[in-house]
């Protein structure tokens, strides 16, 4: 639902009262000339925005019905049937790609439900594929939603500290990716930030005969406070500590980001991602300039929740702010945007196009 600020009262300017210029400035360049009309502005517009560039996230649980997520207004956990219907709505708006996050009924220390063929993502993928053969399905390939401790792999002790066992996690992530591909995922998206995860997954997919399945790497993923609402939605908050030992330091700088992107590229990634998006637009640009791979920006849950809160308080116009935000990702260099605003944004873009078509038809 769109919430707009109240319209400003009409202001009638009395042009007869404006002062006369005694001397006009000698301006050869007047950039405002190119912005005088909507047609002139669109003539040289550099950044395009379309529904086909959006990736719509879906949270899927094993129960029935929808479960609204309080910290993310307008977003719910869906049943498998509800997810199938939501994908149909997305396709009708021109959003052709979805990413699936699973919420299992049971969890254990190694995230078994992530890599079972009867897991929630696998079941949902098969149902969505049967109902909507044309949709592109991305499966989130991680273990944090499935472990009882909320970390992204099995645990071990190193130097007296309990942490994720990197190499043990690689085996489980590879099993998860193959199971997701077998269910019909077009793309697997490893988000665990384990060293070597892209190579392990690519090798396993190829060995299982899934050479056509793509790998979208969460290559540059920061240990961010902006994930709070997502963890509410997915039930993936760590039961102890944080993920700072495997996700990236926000103050780590460009070299670390470039290194992570280069390593994942060398290991066989087909896409790179920067997450979060808005606080890291500069990083998106740096990766864009350094890499030839397609680049995805994740407009994460905290960014979504902040904007929704400002709209609810009457501080921002929702449509204009959302579209401006998505344009910022594109301007920074993202080819595609993973965003909870996808359906609203697609609807607004379609409405704007219909208005333009109506104007042209009357000319």
Image: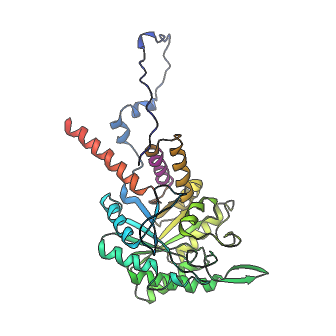
Percent of width and height locating residue 106: 54, 80
Residue at the limit of the structure toward the bottom, as seen here: 207
243 inside magenta stretch: no
Residue numbers of the magenta segment: 321-332
Q: Residue at x 30, y 76 (%)?
A: 130
Number of labels in the image equals 0
Residue drawn at 54 percent across, 69 percent down: 234
Q: Residue furthest right?
A: 160
Taking depth in this image into account, of 173 and 22 the one nearest to the observer is 173
From this viewpoint, is residue 287 visible? Answer: yes
Q: Residue 250's spot in the image, x, y percent?
A: 66, 60
Location of the C terminus by quadrant is top left
Please tell me in which quadrant of the rendered image residue 168 appears: bottom right
Question: Which residue: 49% across, 56% down?
Answer: 333
Residue furthest left as drawn: 362
Q: Is residue 328 magenta?
A: yes
Residue 211 visible from this viewpoint: no
The colour scheme is rainbow
**Above or below: residue 153 compared with residue 18:** below
**Residue 140 place in picture, x, y as percent:** 49, 73
Please identify the dominant SS of the magenta region.
Answer: helix
Asked if residue 185 is positioned above or below residue 330 in the image, the reply reads below
């Amino acid at each position: 639902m769109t919430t707009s600020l109240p319209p400003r009262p009409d202001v009638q300017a009395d042009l007869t009262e404006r002062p006369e210029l005694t001397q006009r400035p000698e301006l050869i360049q007047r950039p405002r000339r190119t912005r005088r009309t909507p047609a002139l502005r669109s003539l040289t517009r550099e950044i395009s925005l379309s529904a086909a560039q959006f990736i719509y996230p879906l949270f899927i649980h094993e129960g029935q019905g929808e479960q609204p997520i309080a910290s993310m207004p307008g977003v719910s956990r869906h049943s498998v049937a509800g997810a199938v219907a939501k994908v149909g709505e997305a396709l009708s708006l021109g959003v052709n790609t979805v990413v699936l996050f699973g919420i299992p009924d049971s969890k254990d220390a190694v995230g078994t439900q992530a890599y079972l063929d009867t897991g929630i993502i696998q079941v949902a993928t098969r149902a969505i594929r049967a109902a909507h053969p044309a949709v592109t399905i991305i499966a989130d390939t991680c273990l944090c939603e499935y472990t009882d401790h909320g970390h992204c792999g099995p645990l071990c002790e190193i130097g007296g500290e309990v942490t994720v066992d990197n190499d043990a996690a690689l085996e489980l992530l590879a099993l998860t990716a193959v199971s997701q591909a077998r269910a019909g995922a077009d793309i697997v998206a490893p988000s665990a930030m384990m060293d070597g995860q892209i190579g392990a997954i690519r090798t396993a997919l190829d060995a299982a005969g899934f050479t056509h399945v793509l790998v979208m790497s969460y290559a540059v993923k920061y240990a961010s406070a902006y994930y709070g609402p997502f963890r509410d939605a997915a039930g993936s908050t760590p039961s102890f500590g944080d993920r700072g030992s495997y996700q990236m330091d926000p103050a780590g700088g460009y070299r670390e980001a470039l290194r992570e992107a280069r390593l994942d590229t060398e290991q066989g990634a087909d896409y790179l991602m920067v997450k979060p998006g808005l606080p890291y637009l500069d990083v998106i640009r740096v990766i864009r300039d350094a890499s030839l791979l397609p680049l995805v920006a994740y407009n994460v849950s905290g960014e979504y929740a902040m904007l929704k809160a400002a709209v609810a308080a009457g501080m921002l116009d929702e449509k204009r702010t959302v579209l401006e935000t998505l344009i910022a990702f594109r301007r920074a260099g993202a080819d595609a945007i993973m965003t909870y605003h996808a359906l609203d944004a697609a609807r607004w873009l379609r409405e704007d196009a219909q208005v333009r078509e109506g104007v042209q038809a009357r000319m």
